[in-house]
Amino acid sequence: MRLYRDFQSKGNRPANMTAQAEAHPRVTILGVPIDPVTFDQMLDRIATWIAAGDRLHQICTVSPEFVMIAQDNPEFMCVLRTADLCVADGVGLLFAARYLGHRLPERVTGSDGTPLIAQRAAREGWSLFLLGAGPGVAERAADRLIRQNPGLRVVGTWAGSPAPEEEEEIVARVNAAGADILLVAYGAPRQDLWIARNRDRLDVSVAIGVGGSLDFVAGVVPRAPRWMRRLALEWLFRLMRQPWRWRRMLRLPRFVWAVLRHRERAIAQEGEPS
Ligand code: UDP
């Protein structure tokens, strides 16, 4: 009974959830809430938050890897459950949602989302701050995004690190820049924990963890060719380019196994979910 209710649960949404969000109930996969939104809906949500300008709104780009990390990391699980928006960054989540009787409209990846955010930002006049990635990468990413989107305002870039002793200085830099949107590229779970730890003192409307996206935008790491992405083989391309990822990628079969077991248990206790 309890497990089946978990499938249906919406996660712990912040109290001031918008009516727009209410119209798209969250899907919960192994305790992690995922919002069934498209890229356009994410951008519209960002527009609403920037117009409100009341507080920081956190977006997490959740992959199956995030879900498995959260199983063993209660702090990360809590961050995902209290984020304002969790998008499905991974085809595995779309399959899992369908297997559990729900629907997620499309993959909303940080890698595709970063250029789309920049595009919309140039149109709307939103300003960006790019934080994280290797030395010089955020600057290169900013140059490229500005070249691709004339008029885009990137008001700051900084590599820094997610180490707590650097937090004070980084927060001061971000606040002095006066950005609307902060993109944080420290990888999961560090980037998301970093945002959550600092959300009350960061003066931005939106903060989003974007993983390796700045590496892709800057061109320091190539993205998988389109055909591999279409066949959901991006993970294989990344593994071939960066073999040290193999250990991290063991989380993918663990994710599949956990989802299968979760549904089996639910059926045993409740009968086939409709
Ligand atoms: N990174 C960083 N500082 C750190 C750890 C990671 O700037 O202490 C950056 C790293 O250079 C990369 C990004 O964080 O640009 C994370 O990349 P990864 O490919 O691991 O993330 P994923 O896309 O797999 O979440």
Image (cartoon, rainbow, N blue to C red):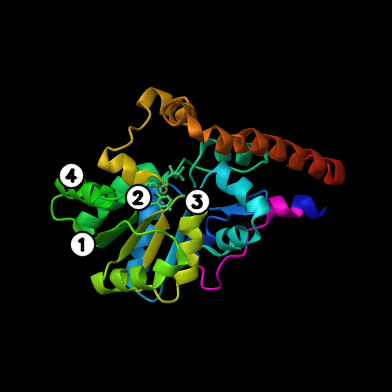
Identify the residue at image location x=75%, y=42%. 262
Which residue carries the number 2 mark? 133
The amino acid pointed to by label 3 is Ala
Residue 191 drawn above or below residue 105: below
The residue lying toward the viewer, choosing from 105 and 34, is: 34
9 part of magenta stretch:
yes
Query: For the residues marked 4 and 1, what is the alpha-carbon distance in whole angstroms?
Result: 15 Å
The amino acid pointed to by label 1 is Gly
Query: What is the secondary structure assignment of the residue under circle 2?
Result: loop
Q: Residue 148: which disc?
A: 4
Q: How busy is the neighbourhood of tag 4: few (under 14 within 10 Å), some, or many (20 plus)?
A: some
Q: Residue 144: which disc?
A: none
Q: Percent position (x, y) of residue 54?
A: 38, 76
Which residue carries the number 1 mark? 125
Query: What is the secondary structure assignment of the residue under circle 1?
Result: loop
Query: For the residues marked 2 and 1, what is the alpha-carbon distance in whole angstroms?
Result: 25 Å
Badge 3 or badge 1: first in the primary sequence: 1
Magenta range is 5-18
Label 2, ligand 1: CB separation under 8 Å:
yes
